[in-house]
Amino acid sequence: CCDKRFSRKANLNIHLKTHTGEKPFQCDFCENKFTQKSSLNLHLKIHTGEKSFKCDFCEKNFSLKHHLIQHLRIHAKEKSFQCEYCQKKLARKCDLNKHIKIHTGEKPFQCDFCEKKFAQKDDLIKHLRVHTGEKPFQCYCCEKKFREKSNMKKHLKIHEREDPLYLPTVIKEKKSNK
């Protein structure tokens, strides 16, 4: 297959799965499959909400260490990924890949209900809520539900105007009960 050499047979067996495509470890929460149990265990943190990697510059927490490392580039103002079409520089490769679709017009994610296409998987997921009626974001104060987090955040400002001290207290209580 390739010229890679390993001192341990276990490492060779793990590597061979990259050539065969074998992924025997499947997530119980989604469709993702992995070549190694350790990779599955890392992935599971996304579903459990465990976020043990904290940014020292802001309040963000991350499930995976490499997500924190990618995030830190934003604070460092390091923009080492450049668009070949417009020369715009971005901090993360995933952001560059999303940006490039603006130029190429590529829309690989299609709605099964109305066949509308999207450049980003996240945009398709948001769109699907129009068809399913799902509203996963709930107001801490009045329990009103929203399809998008941004709409919930706008709504929270109503409560802030009503009682500026109430909202931070409710949010703090909700977080401490988790």
Image (cartoon, rainbow, N blue to C red):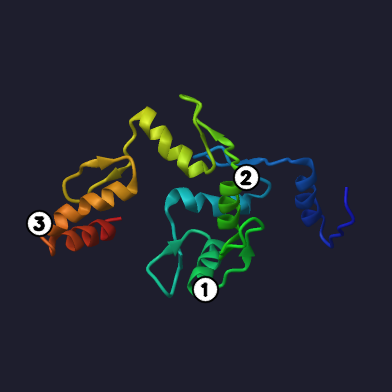
Mark nearer the N terminus (2 vs 1):
1
Q: Label 2 belongs to which residue? A: 104
Q: Residue at x 51, y 70 (%)?
A: 72
Query: For the residues marked 2 and 1, what is the alpha-carbon distance in whole angstroms?
Result: 26 Å
How many tags in the picture?
Answer: 3
| Label 2–label 3 contact, CB within 8 A | no
At label 1, the amino acid type is Lys
Query: For the residues marked 2 and 3, what is the alpha-carbon distance in whole angstroms?
Result: 46 Å
Q: Label 1 belongs to which residue? A: 77
Q: Residues within 10 Å of mark 1 (few under 14, many from 20)?
A: few
Q: Residue furthest front?
A: 86
Please tell me whether mark 3 sits on a helix, a strand or a loop. Answer: helix
Q: Label 3 belongs to which residue? A: 162
Residue 49 percent location from the top left of the image: 42, 53
Left-right relation of 137 to 4: left
- Judge depth for marks 2 and 3 and give the one in front: 2
Left-right relation of 131 to 38: left
